[in-house]
Each structure stands twice: as structure tokens, then as C-alpha cells.
């Protein structure tokens, strides 16, 4: 048996992702009072309460608790699709396309049309019109039936006026609109646009609880009654019908009812501070730091992600590539230390420019290759997000 990793105790210095946020003592206390019904039979009160509450926030008829954002995205997209051949259009960086293990091909048997936005940041209606596949009887094509947008994507807040334009066009063309809202709380906190307004635009939204909100796990998928009822069917099929989910939902409700907006705005200020620091040292960024992510442009800066990870370890901060993720549990001291790690990596790159030939990825595969004594084999394999 190989050795277990050290127990994880704090995300205060963890810039790898906001998925590392840890449950608070308040959440754990709340879990002790949670309902204990069987959620598959719709008998768990705290699960039902959370589903209804988040649906209400989004102005939707119903919600469905899913154990992960991946599950809620995949069953939502499957539910919007009926008669193949069909396709889903999304940004080439979309999580549903790049990080959900080809779920769209397997569960939905859908073709994906990944689009590189012409403005480099978010797809416009013009981009969509240029790449969608019309339902025009041409037997060569797989007509576009769903448009899956992410808000935020790469930390970028989707401009509301663009979403309104896209929505109108989707309605004219019988195309469903799904939102991967893993960080929709960040979009709300930064833009001031209420969740309900996004609910008016999207037919379905996957609202993550486990990212910047800090709940231990899960997402709430919201939509109309009929849609959510069918999603529940697919959730069961995919093994997502879990039993006493009250404890998890009670913990998540502590976050939903708490001061998440202020917490997220603080993490955005930290990201803006880091972005300013990078710009003041001519360290190029890949995307605007609208919310909680700072994307270092490793290609332009010639920075080596492995060196970045090791500089992080030297300054006791955790990194895994070019995406630097803020969240409300990051400490002010860690932010100062990550600046030094980034600057030293950039200075190293001036003498030792690094050209990554391989695919851009996010996960650091450190120690996934370990020997029987539990020692990491080979160098840290680190990729740009
Ligand atoms: C944009 C985005 N969508 C969906 C997911 C999937 O969420 P989960 O990890 O809970 O499956 C993630 C990552 O966690 C994400 O970053
Ligand atoms: C990589 C992705 O799956 C994860 N959601 C993250 O943002 O860290």
C-alpha cells in the first residue's frame, strides 16, 4: 500500500483552484442538524429546501441537487437533446468540452463545435452565427440544438447585452441555451446583475456550490419543472441519485444564505491586485482578470509552468500552471508570496525561455506517478490551463 498524502488542512495558500475551498466550522455544525431523508424518494427536507431556494434565486421553477458540476452540466445538455444527429456549440475552452471526459459524445452522442472567440475573450452572436449548423435539411450536417455558454469563463464576466442578443437569436432559431455557472456567483458579485436576470436568459443553469462558494461538493441544476423532472431521470441513470444528501445541502445552504457576495468581491480585489502587479512588471496575461482568476500568458512570457510550481513550493504557495485562482480563503500573506514566485519565474524565463510544445492542460500530474514507497517518479508534470 502506498503512503497517504498529508492531511489537507487549509486552502489559505492554495492558488490551484477555488475547488480547494474547505468547509467552515459553521457548515459542519449545521450538518449535525441536517435532515436525514432519502433524497431519491424526494423525502429529504434540506435537499428540497436548497433546490427550491437556488431555483428561486435564479427565477426558475425547479432545481436538482447534483453531486458535481460535471454531472449537472452533462444531464442538462443531454436533456435538451432529442433526435440525433445534433451538435452542441461552445467556446473551445468550455469545461463541458475540455474537462468532462467526452461526456457529450458518450451520454449525449453529440458532436461539439468548439469556437475560438474572435475577440479572444467571449463568443459574440456574430461568432455563433458564423459557426452554428442550421437545421436546413442538409443531410451532411449535425444541426446545432444547444448553445452552452460559461459565465464566468476563464474568469471573464459575459456582458449582459451580448447574452440578451444571443438569447433572442436562439429563440428565433429553436436553439436551447445552457449556462455552465460553475462561477456564476462570481459573475453576479462582480457585475451586479442579479442571478434572476441570468435565469431569464438561460433555459438551464448549472450552479456550482463547491467552487468560490466553498461548499464541500455539488451543484444545483435549475430549469422549468418538466425539464428538471427529466434531468432527475438522467441523474438516476448516471448514478447521481444519492440518498441522505441533507448534510451536504445543509452545509451548502450556510454558504448560499451567507455573505458570499462580500467574500467573492474580496477574492476579485485580490485578483485585480495580482493582475496590476503582473502588468507593472510587464508579465503578460492571457485574459482580463474580471473576477477571481489571473491567467498568466505562459506562451508570450516563455515561463515554464514546472518552474512556476517549484517557485511556488519555495514560497509556500500552491500553483499548478498559468491559471492563478483566488478564493475567499486565500490569505493576504499568501498573495504577497505568490507575487514573488511569479516574478522570479518570469525573471528566470528571461534567461531560460520555455516553449511548451505540448497541449495546454490544467492539472499538475505531480506524484500521480509514484513508486511503491510512495515517492513521486520523475519531474512534476505541470501544464498551462
Ligand atoms: C467551469 C467549470 N464547470 C464545471 C466544473 C465541474 O465541476 P465539478 O468539479 O464539481 O464536476 C468545473 C470544475 O470543477 C469548472 O471549472
Ligand atoms: C479543472 C476544472 O475541472 C476544475 N473545475 C477547476 O477549475 O479547477
Image: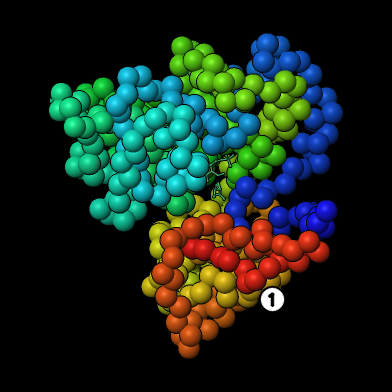
Horizontal and vertical percent position of residue 173: 22, 25
Mark 1: few/some/many CA within 10 Å (<14, 14-19, 20+)? few
Residue drawn at point x = 36 percent, y = 32 percent: 110
Left/right of residue 273 with respect to residue 78 in the rendered view: right
Horizontal and vertical percent position of residue 22: 72, 46
Q: How many marks?
A: 1
Q: Is residue 364 above or below residue 237?
A: below
Q: Nearer the viewer, residue 350 or 266?
A: 350
Residue drawn at point x = 43 percent, y = 34 percent: 104
Left/right of residue 211 with respect to residue 73 in the rendered view: right
Image quarter of residue 260:
top right
Farthest residue, direction front: 372
Residue 282 visible? The answer is yes
Q: Is residue 278 above or below residue 194?
A: below
Residue drawn at point x = 72 percent, y = 24 percent: 245
Residue 332 visible? The answer is no
Residue drawn at point x = 74 percent, y = 42 percent: 23
Q: Is residue 159 above or below residue 49?
A: below
Q: Nearer the viewer, residue 302 or 181?
A: 302
The residue beneath circle 1 is 314
Q: Nearer the viewer, residue 290 or 73?
A: 73
Q: Secondary structure at mark 1?
A: helix
Image quarter of residue 241:
top right
Coloring applied to the structure: rainbow
Left/right of residue 46 with respect to residue 364 in the rendered view: right
Amino acid at each position: 500500500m502506498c503512503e497517504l498524502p498529508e492531511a489537507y488542512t487549509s486552502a489559505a495558500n492554495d492558488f490551484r483552484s477555488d475547488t480547494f475551498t474547505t468547509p467552515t466550522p459553521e457548515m459542519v455544525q449545521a450538518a449535525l442538524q441536517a435532515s436525514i431523508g432519502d433524497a431519491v424518494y424526494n423525502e429529504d427536507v434540506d435537499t428540497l429546501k436548497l433546490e427550491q431556494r437556488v431555483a428561486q434565486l435564479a427565477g426558475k421553477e425547479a432545481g436538482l441537487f447534483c453531486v458535481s458540476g460535471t454531472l449537472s452540466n452533462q444531464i442538462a445538455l443531454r436533456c435538451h437533446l432529442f433526435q440525433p444527429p445534433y451538435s452542441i456549440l461552445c467556446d473551445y475552452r468550455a469545461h463541458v468540452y475540455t474537462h468532462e471526459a467526452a461526456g457529450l459524445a458518450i451520454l449525449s452522442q453529440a458532436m461539439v463545435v468548439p469556437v475560438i472567440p474572435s475577440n479572444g475573450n467571449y463568443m459574440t452572436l456574430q461568432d455563433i452565427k458564423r459557426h452554428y449548423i442550421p437545421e436546413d435539411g442538409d443531410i451532411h450536417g449535425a444541426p446545432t440544438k444547444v448553445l452552452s455558454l460559461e459565465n464566468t469563463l476563464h474568469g471573464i464576466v459575459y456582458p449582459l447585452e451580448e447574452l440578451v442578443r444571443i438569447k433572442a437569436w436562439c429563440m428565433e432559431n429553436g436553439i436551447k441555451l445552457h449556462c455552465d455557472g460553475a462561477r456564476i456567483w462570481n459573475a453576479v458579485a462582480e457585475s451586479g446583475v442579479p442571478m434572476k436576470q441570468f435565469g431569464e436568459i438561460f433555459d438551464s443553469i448549472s450552479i456550482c456550490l463547491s467552487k468560490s462558494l466553498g461548499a464541500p461538493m455539488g451543484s444545483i441544476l435549475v430549469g422549468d419543472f418538466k425539464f428538471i423532472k427529466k434531468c432527475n431521470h438522467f441523474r438516476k441513470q448516471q448514478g447521481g441519485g444519492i440518498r441522505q444528501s441533507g448534510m451536504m445541502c445543509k452545509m451548502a445552504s450556510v454558504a448560499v444564505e451567507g455573505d458570499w457576495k462580500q467574500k467573492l468581491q474580496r477574492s476579485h480585489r485580490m485578483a485585480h491586485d495580482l493582475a496590476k502587479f503582473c502588468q507593472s512588471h510587464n508579465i503578460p496575461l492571457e485574459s482580463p482578470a474580471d473576477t477571481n482568476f489571473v491567467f498568466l500568458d505562459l506562451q508570450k512570457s516563455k515561463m515554464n509552468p514546472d518552474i512556476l510550481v517549484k517557485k511556488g513550493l519555495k514560497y509556500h504557495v500552491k500553483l499548478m500552471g498559468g491559471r492563478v485562482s483566488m478564493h475567499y480563503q486565500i490569505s493576504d500573506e499568501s498573495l504577497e508570496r505568490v507575487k514573488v514566485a511569479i516574478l522570479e519565474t518570469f525573471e528566470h524565463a528571461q534567461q531560460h525561455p520555455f516553449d511548451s510544445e505540448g497541449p495546454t492542460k490544467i492539472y499538475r500530474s505531480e506524484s500521480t506517478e509514484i513508486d511503491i514507497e510512495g515517492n513521486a517518479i520523475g519531474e512534476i508534470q505541470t501544464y498551462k490551463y
